[in-house]
Image: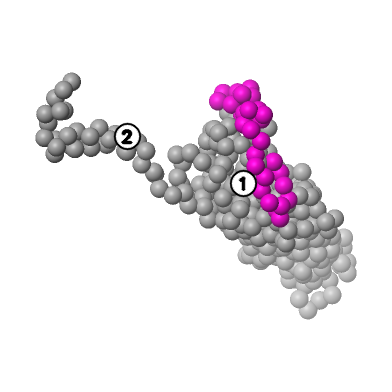
Amino acid sequence: MHASRWAPPALQALIVTAALLPTRAIAAPTGPRTVELRWEAPDGCPAGDEVRNEIIRLLGSSEQRQPIEVDIAVAREGDARLRLALRIRQPAPGERVLQGDDCASMSRAAALIVAMSIDPDAVARNAAAQPQAPDAPVARAPRSPPPASDRPRAADRPTMAGRPPAADRPPAAERDVDGALWLSAHVEQALVPTLGVGLAAGGAIRSGWFRADAAAGVVPSSSGRIAGQAAGAEFRLWFLEVDTCARALGHPAVRVYLCALGRQHWLTATGRQVDEPFHRTAPILALGLGSLIEADIAAPLRLEGALHAVAPLQRPRFIVENLEGTVYRPPAAGVSARLGLALVF
């Protein structure tokens, strides 16, 4: 135990340095955490830097160091309430919409949602180690937090399977399934002789970047006639449609999808100015590609529009017996569009 007394000074320094190496390696920082926050909010709301710092504070000792990219937009709705639209781009994409009257509280809730999506265990540890000061208006000077002994720690509250207490968990993110019912004006050029206007109604299921729709519609009237003659037919189009869509572009309030569709049509023709009665119905299956846009206007309503290129797989020829010439034959491809409102639930 007295060997160090007789060791040369250089050897003593080497021994001390070697003893410190493990401690320094363990304590070495893993690098700064990168939080890229795009923040839009009206006057009276906290600054974007405050929200960014709150995210960093909540993560605290988390070892997760992936870059964080978040878009948050706060806007006032018609009834003076506030609507906060949150979109996490990295590391775990997700969306969430909050509504309330207190911008500061909503901003803190948004920061909590972001932190919980990255490392919920770290948020629980930091909530216990660094409790947040009581709520206060943005302009008020910060107050000293009450003694830790007066506040219940998160670690003291019951937990399940190591997860943070229910009071600390954010609401379910928008990656959970949501639905909508919609009603739209439908414009058809692909399967009727002249441009037709009708109605379409359907339902949608959305989960994260994916959306699926099922719809039915009718174009009640479109007319065609044999070239150079008065004889022709009145047409009515019924259809059932299934769409599958993938989100291509996203904003907290506007989303753009690319869609593939399958549509089963029933095209009915009734003779007009013909000597003998003429009535025919032809089933036509068609496939298509297009785009769909969602725009939030006022919860729970949103505006929706779609534009599709449609190609029929069958092209029946509508003719009138005893007359030469074709009344109508569907083209090889055409377009259809819709615009309307959706009720989200």
Q: Give the label on residue 335, or none.
A: none
Residue depicted at 62% across the width and 42% down the height: 112
The secondary structure type at the circle numbered 2 is helix
Residue depicted at 83% across the width and 71% down the height: 231
Left or right: 86, with 340 as reference point? left
Point out the stretch of residues depicted in magenta. 134-162
User: Which residue is the site of mark 2?
Assistant: 23
Q: Is residue 136 magenta?
A: yes
Residue 168, position in %: x, y?
65, 34
The quadrant where residue 337 appears = bottom right
The residues tagged by marks 1 and 2 sit, at their Cα atoms, a distance apart of 33 Å
Is residue 176 positioned above or below 223 on the image?
Answer: above
The quadrant where residue 37 appears = bottom right
Q: Amino acid at mark 1?
A: Ala
The reply to whether residue 72 is in sight is yes
Residue depicted at 69% across the width and 59% down the height: 41
Which comes before the other along the chain, label 1 or label 2?
2
| Rendered-image quadrant of the C terminus | top right
Residue placed furthest toward the top = 1
Circle nearer the viewer, 1 or 2:
2
Is residue 59 positioned above or below 225 on the image?
Answer: above
Left or right: 114, with 274 as reference point? left
| Rendered-image quadrant of the N terminus | top left
User: Which residue is the site of mark 1?
Assistant: 111
The quadrant where residue 255 appears = bottom right
Q: Amino acid at mark 2?
A: Thr
Left or right: 286, with 66 as reference point? right
Residue placed furthest toward the bottom = 228
